Amino acid sequence: MGDEGPVWTVTAEVIEWRGPAPFHYLPLTVDDSAELKIEAAGLEYWGQIAVFVEIDGNTFRTAVFPKDGRYLVPLRAAVRKKHGIELGDRVTANVWLNPDR
């Protein structure tokens, strides 16, 4: 993992989006989102892109999806609990493509 191409380091405030259900996300910047979209050409499915995410040495798989011109990284409850992440916290994560999704 991590040898598949570029790694985006994201530091952002954890946000909540109440789509079908409330979830917590880490938003990528608009520039990083544009670059990720280019790098993921052919890997998108239903607008989502499969990625690996690493926070404080904990790596997990998920899929980012577009919202308002940027991609959002879902932060599962188990990940948030393990790292004590709350809504509004500033979190740093490394994100890279998962070509095997």
Image (cartoon, rainbow, N blue to C red):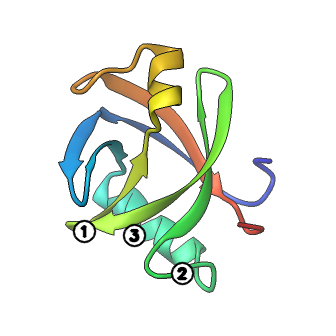
What residue is disc 2 on?
Answer: 45
The percent position of residue 42, horizontal first and vertical second, equals: 62, 86
Task: State if disc 1 and disc 2 touch (CB < 8 Å).
Answer: no
What residue is disc 3 on?
Answer: 34
Q: CA distance from mark 2 to mark 1?
A: 17 Å
The percent position of residue 56, horizontal first and vertical second, equals: 59, 21
Q: Residue at x 29, y 33 (%)?
A: 14
Hey, what amino acid is under mark 1? Answer: Gly
Q: CA distance from mark 3 to mark 1?
A: 8 Å
Is label 2 in a helix, a strand or a loop?
Answer: loop
Instruction: Return the disc, 2 or 3, that comes first in the chain's sequence.
Output: 3
Hey, what amino acid is under mark 2? Answer: Tyr
Q: Taking 34 as reference, is 43 left or right?
A: right
Q: Residue at x 21, y 49 (%)?
A: 17
Neighbor class of circle 2 (other Cα within 10 Å; few <14, some 14-19, many 20+) is few
The percent position of residue 98, horizontal first and vertical second, equals: 70, 61
Instruction: Return the disc, 3 or 1, that comes first in the chain's sequence.
Output: 3
What residue is disc 1 on?
Answer: 69
Q: Residue at x 58, y 82 (%)?
A: 41
As rendered, which of 62 and 12 lies closer to the eye?
62
Q: Residue furthest bottom?
A: 42
